[in-house]
Amino acid sequence: MSVFYSLAQGEASYRNFQILAGYWLVKPVFWGIIFALFFHLCHGVRHLLWDLGKSFNPALLNLYATMELLCAAGLALLTWLLF
Amino acid sequence: MSLHQKLPASPTKDWLLQRITAVLLVPLTMPLLIFLKLCLNATYAETMAWLKSPWHTLALELWLLLTCYHAVLGLRVVIEDYVADEATQLLLIKAINLVFAFAAVAALYFIFCIY
């Protein structure tokens, strides 16, 4: 919402937004949100698998839990490399 | 009396809509990330040029609406599961509906202001 607001307010407010976003304390928050987004996405895919009635045995549960974390980290890292 | 009789929507329909919005939101992550990348790095003119393409606007607006609805449905489930008192539950659900409706409408309004 604030991003669209700063864009709608014109160039000066957009630059202010970029200065705020470039502040060192804001960056880890931004990347934390990106990681959380991907983790949520990966876990959501697993929920869809569960909805299909699949992957309920303990070994697979542990394996997928690890895969989920690794995929989320990998996707966040990929995004960071492409940014 | 069951709790669900007090709530307007059907839980089964909510469950299904939660899944539908989830699946639709997966591909929409891409335009969102591109937009965020532009916002952090590109000039005002570049970001505006990208945003003014109809497909990009449509993708972001769709992402916005679906995310707000997905969040409302998800938080409703969390409240139903973890808040024991039914009156508090209803109040919280209504508050969350209002907050996300406001967020969605405000963000859409700002997007329309860009044009």
Image (tube, rainbow, N blue to C red):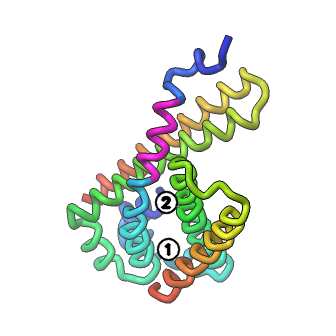
User: Does residue B8 belong to the magenta stretch?
Assistant: no
Instruction: Quarter of the image for the N terminus of chain B: give it.
Output: top right
In the rendered image, the vertical position of residue A40 relative to residue A24, given as above or below: above
Q: Position of residue A37 (x, y in %)?
A: 56, 65
Residue drawn at (50%, 30%) of the image? B12
Judged by its main secondary structure, the magenta piece is helix
Query: Which residue is painted at 29% across and 52% down in the image?
Result: B112
Name which of mark 2 and mark 1 comes first in the sequence: 2
Place residue A32 in its image quadrant.
Answer: bottom right
Of B22 and B83, which appears nearest the observer? Answer: B22
Vertical order, A23 against A5 (above or below): below
Label 2 resides on the chain identified as: A
A81 over B83 or under it: above or below: below
User: Which residue lies at the image location 29% right of the left edge and 77% below the top edge?
Assistant: B45
Left or right of residue B63: residue A70: right
* Location of mark 2 (residue): A2
Same chain assignment for discs 2 and 1: yes
Residue A63 in percent (x, y) is at 67, 70
Compared with B29, B17 (above or below) is above
SS at circle 2:
helix
Mark on residue B25?
none
Amino acid tagged 1: Asn
Label 2 crowd bin: few (<14), some (14–19), many (20+), radius 10 Å: few
Q: Nearer the viewer, mark 2 or mark 1?
A: 2
Label 1 belongs to which residue?
A16
In the displayed orientation, state which residue is furthest to the right. Answer: B84
Q: Is residue A22 left or right of residue A28?
A: left
Residue numbers of the magenta segment: B12-22
Give the residue type at disc 2: Ser
Residue at the top extreme of this rendering = B1
